[in-house]
Amino acid sequence: MLKYAKMVTAVPGPKSKQVLERADRHVASAFKVLAPVVIDHGEGALVTDIDGNTYIDFTGGIGTLNVGHHHPQVTAALHEQIDRFLHTDFTVIPYESLVELAEKLGKKVPVEHPVKCAFFNSGAEAVENAVKIAKVYSGKSAMIAFEGAFHGRTLMAMSLTSKSKPYKQGFGPFAPEVYRVPYAYCYRCPLKAHYPECGIGCADLLQRAFDLFIPPEDTAAVIIEAIQGEGGFVVPPVEYIARIAEICKKNGVLLIADEIQTGFGRTGRMFAVEHSNVKPDLVTMAKSIAAGIPLSAVAGRAEVMDGPGDGRIGGTYVGNPVGCVAALQVLDIMEKENLPAKADRLGAKMLGRLNLMKAKHPLIGDARGRGLMVAIELVRDQKTKEPAAKEASMVLKHCMQKGVIPLKCGLHGNVVRMLASLVITDDQMNEGLDLLEQAIGEVEKEMGIKA
């Protein structure tokens, strides 16, 4: 008997179906929906659609809802702010909430002090501006990113992004002077080696790039995700990020940590690079910074952040006051409810369950994650590791019919990822995983896959 997922109609239900048919007629086809349900309301880690079906939400707004849907402390602060004012542009008429947020955020980010912050609207904007800051400060033009990386969809961010389809195809030419090196994808090791016997040799490919392709004298920064998100929830060894930071420092190249998906407690620490005891020069943040209100940030060493002169970075809506008050509440909730520690505890349980599933289900090639950033990579054959993209889509469809909504990612589209809100309960998580395992078993049966 299910306690949380409650299905009263087929998916999509009749009301959702009507809205989705209207969307087909009036909304650009690029905005294709994952879950064919239309939300009515959300609470914590649960969402209820307009047909009355309740789902366990393993998507968390693609990582924007670490404090959950409709957290009362956030909504109360939003109502209070809306009753006061909505906008001025901080550079015209400033407001205290942005200053307070910069103060508090600066104390949290793992960057050498003193720290300064700049605020923007989206993750891609944060990346664009971090690159601009790095280039101005260093006086250099080249950037190095990683295979499998995702940094956004604006020009510079898209140029740094690795996945061609659907994010880059047809949108060129891209920003020049972007170079790419392999990432520590241990399940599909670029060096065909085995961790830890490999000695993290893939990190040394960055030094090789400096020696052979782009000299550090021309390289403004290296940008890296401490755990790759869209690339497939690829979790490198903690020593890997530390080695990358060491190579950057040795060569006098800035390090930008993209914490847009990994930040704000997601991996069991406030920021994922903390697992490696790394202090980047710049950190980009967005997603869960403001509980779903558009806001992003770049935080970094003060001298680097002050590289651009007056008016060289910014925008009309950047650091909007509604987002700032939401972000202040998020920081408070993270501390009061100790959500990073909860993510660490629940994530270990979730990964343990997924590894048990892997032992029983040949469709699962790998289970990986850190904190509540967890995924399974589906394969048609565990020995050849042939990606099972079609089967991953089938698993998602079965999950939604049962009342749990996960996500898909990976360069081959074969990774099922979970980004549940950090406020999810043990019982909700376990019920969602039960439904996921049922869905995997049904797909294996349909495809004739036997243990």
Image (cartoon, grey):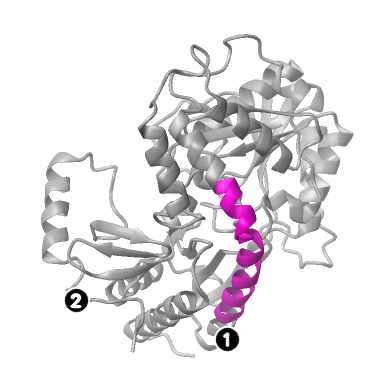
**Residue at 11% across / 64% down in the picture?**
14
Q: Which element type, helix, strand or loop, lies under badge 1?
A: helix
Q: Main secondary structure of the magenta part?
A: helix
User: Which percent across, then down, holds residue 308?
Assistant: 66, 14
Give the residue number, with chain letter if any, for mark 1.
359
Q: Quadrant of residue 397?
A: bottom left
Q: CA distance from mark 1 to mark 2?
A: 33 Å
**Residue at 24% across / 70% down in the picture?**
53
Q: Which residues are magenta?
A: 330-354
Q: In the image, 119: left or right of 182?
A: left
Q: In the image, 410: left or right of 220?
A: left
Instruction: Please say if 11 is above or below 340.
Output: below
Reply yes or no: does residue 234 show up in magenta: no
User: Which percent across, then down, holds residue 415?
Assistant: 49, 64
User: Which percent across, then down, holds residue 394?
Assistant: 34, 71
Badge 1 amino acid: Ala
Give the residue number, with chain letter if any, for mark 2.
8
The number of discs equals 2
Reply yes or no: does residue 343 show up in magenta: yes
How crowded is the residue under tag 2: few (<14 C-alpha within 10 Å), some, or many (20+)? few
Instruction: Please say if 156 is above or below 374.
Output: above
Asked whether residue 180 is in view, the answer is no
Badge 2 amino acid: Val
- Mark 1 or mark 2: whose residue is earlier in sequence: 2
Q: In the image, 30: left or right of 239?
A: left
How crowded is the residue under tag 1: few (<14 C-alpha within 10 Å), some, or many (20+)? few
Asked whether residue 268 is in view, the answer is yes
Instruction: Please say if 123 is above or below 277.
Output: above
Q: Nearer the viewer, mark 1 or mark 2?
A: 2
